Image: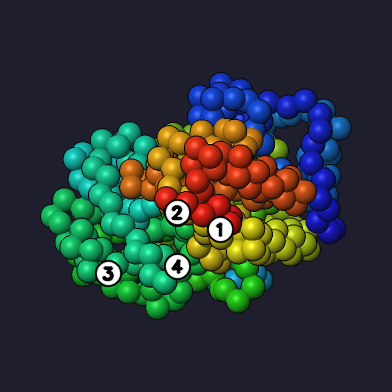
Amino acid sequence: MKFTEKKVAAKNSFIRNSSSMLKNVFGTTEVTPFWIADMDFTIAKPIQQELQRLVERNQFAYENDSATVFNAISGWFKRRHNLTLSSNQFVQVPGVLAGIALLIRELSQDGEGVLIQTPAYHQFAKVISGAGRDVVKSPLQLVNGRYEVDYSDLEEKLSADNVTLMILCNPHNPVGRVWREHEIRQIQTLAEKHGVTIISDEIHADIIYSGHKFTSLMATGAEKHVALIGSPAKTFGMQSISNGYIYSENQEIFDTMSKLSQSLYIDHGNAFTTFATIAAFDQGGEWLDGFLQQMQETVEWIASFLAEKLPNVTMTPVEGTYQVWLDFSKLGYSNDGLVKLFGDAGFGVSPGTWFGENHGQFARMNFAAPKADVESAFLRLQAAISSASGQYNGCGGSASKSCC
Ligand SMILES: Cc1ncc(COP(=O)(O)O)c(C=O)c1O
């Protein structure tokens, strides 16, 4: 069943619409939310049908089937990424962040360091410090407009005595890189040299644009490391009805996590997560192809709009994920001024400071929304920049207004 661009008009309590959140960040609720990484679209028909089947059956005795879920994920990864994953090496957890939180607690000690590559998905730091570990940051480098790994900084940080874990985000949220195989191998070589285990967060694995190819860490370093693989949340827009799946071929890690998940009684989903996940991975491929096609068109539209109409706002190439990392530094706003501009324009993006203290001139936009909504948001942004140009000349300090 094909992807169609439909969204829910009915009243809802989606977090993205939270008035306290919007007011707190933008000073107003009058913004179109592009901040949280979910989808403003209805889901694929086969998933909806499974959910409907359960609702219509109207009986909810204990029911779950992790073995069939693991087979569905494994089949999907074989078909979609030509990656062979053994159905016996999955451990079910309530979500990807929950899985990372558990892994950090089990695979490191109090006070040890966990490395992240900044700018980084903001919840990583919270999960690390919440577990009583140090957040160790290795900044990515912007080289000719694209983020790259700074291997010498990475090695220096990995070699610190207390660093025992690294979270690799592949594809990377927020910068949209899909790490190439040689990059993953180099990161892995450094991690192994310094005795660091990599937790590879691959939740965005299926959101890959043309010309790019996803390489799982499990294709290059299965025996030593661990991945959060197979969550249907981002791929199928199932953020509120999905689980997380840890995958490891390292028997020690697998046994530890399996035992933990069982002992906490979190090693299974409920009927909704179970059957929705199976339907998604068994039957969601055609829908995903249509969705990716639309996302590709949206991101291409954003790139040409910026190049033609707002050349002082730039973006790094989006290789994967439905997030675009926007750079506003040429406009000459203060960090707070920039967030005020977003509020004035109703442009509800995530401020860059969420992803790293040095990124106040950036913002992350989740563009998994109807194209018309994305386009009108950029038009409002353009208008807000122009109308503020008396106060902010919009040209990085230049007197000329013709540049934007
Ligand atoms: C890289 C990454 N990991 C994890 C999550 C959250 O996953 P979950 O909702 O399964 O905890 C997100 C959501 O935005 C994400 O971008």
Alpha carbon separation for disc pair 4 and 1: 20 Å
Mark 4–mark 3 contact, CB under 8 Å?
A: no
Alpha carbon separation for disc pair 3 and 1: 37 Å
Q: Which residue is mark 1?
A: 403
Q: Which residue is mark 2?
A: 398
Where disc 2 sits, the SS reads: loop
Q: What's the amino acid at mark 3?
A: Tyr
Which class describes the residues within 10 Å of circle 4: few (<14), some (14-19), or many (20+)?
Answer: few
**Rendered image: mark on residue 151:** 3
Looking at the rendered image, the disc whose residue lies closer to the viewer, 4 or 1, is 1
Alpha carbon separation for disc pair 2 and 4: 22 Å
Q: Looking at the rendering, which quadrant does residue 211 occupy? A: bottom right
Q: What's the amino acid at mark 2?
A: Ser
Assign the N terminus to one quadrant of the image. bottom right
Where disc 1 sits, the SS reads: loop
Where disc 4 sits, the SS reads: loop
Looking at the rendered image, the disc whose residue lies closer to the viewer, 3 or 2, is 2
Mark 2–mark 1 contact, CB under 8 Å?
A: yes
